[in-house]
Image: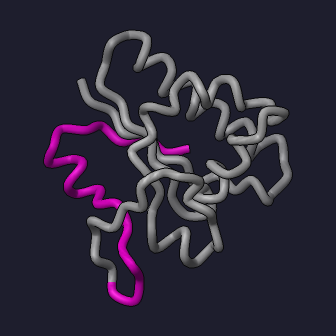
Amino acid sequence: MKTAVLVFADPKAGSEESLGRLYNALATVYEYKTAGEEVSLYFQGTGTRWPEQLQKTDHPAHQLFKAIEDKVAGISCGCADVFGANAAGFDLIKDNKVPGTTGLPSLVQMQKEGFNILSF
């Protein structure tokens, strides 16, 4: 089983709902990882703002993020451009050459590679 987890929730929303979506995405990656399943985490849309926040040791999801940080596939390049996100040392993904952007992750490619896609 292969799973790709995509985070779209916006940390700037400042809501419990946004933090809850992020936390559940990270917990899902953690569960797949500890079960020995292939899993990858992607940050897209306004979710590209999370990695910089998660580097802060006082963030409530920091420890969980550190436990699954090795599963971060990367950050949508085009989305990071639009939303002014810092890649925080992660790869910028641009497989899907969407016109007018620097590229986004390709969901078609993920599916062709056998990934189930979950979004938060």
Q: 10 and 86: which one is in front? A: 86
Q: Quadrant of the C terminus?
A: top right
In this image, 58 relative to 92: left or right? right
Specify whether residue 11 is painted magenta.
no
- On the rendered structure, is 104 left or right of 96? right
Magenta stretch bounds = 99-120
Q: Position of residue 50 (x, y in %)?
A: 66, 50
Q: Residue at the front extreme?
A: 89
Task: Pinpoint residue 17: horizontal percent, then vertical percent.
Answer: 77, 43
Quarter of the image with the N terminus is: top left
Residue 116 magenta-highlighted: yes
Furthest-bottom residue in this view: 100
Image colouring: one colour
State the residue in front, 90 or 18: 90
Q: From the viewer's perspective, is 57 left or right of 3?
A: right
Up-down relation of residue 45 to residue 55 (above or below): below
Task: Name which quarter of the figure residue 105 lies in.
Answer: bottom left
- Tell me the residue at 43%/51% (across/down): 74
Q: Compared to 84, does 24 lie above or below?
A: above
Q: Residue at x 41, y 82 (%)?
A: 101
Q: Specify whether 9 is left or right of 57.
A: left
Single out the residue that lies furthest toward the top.
35
Residue at figure coordinates x 38%, y 10% from the top left: 35
Image position, residue 38 (x, y; %): 29, 25
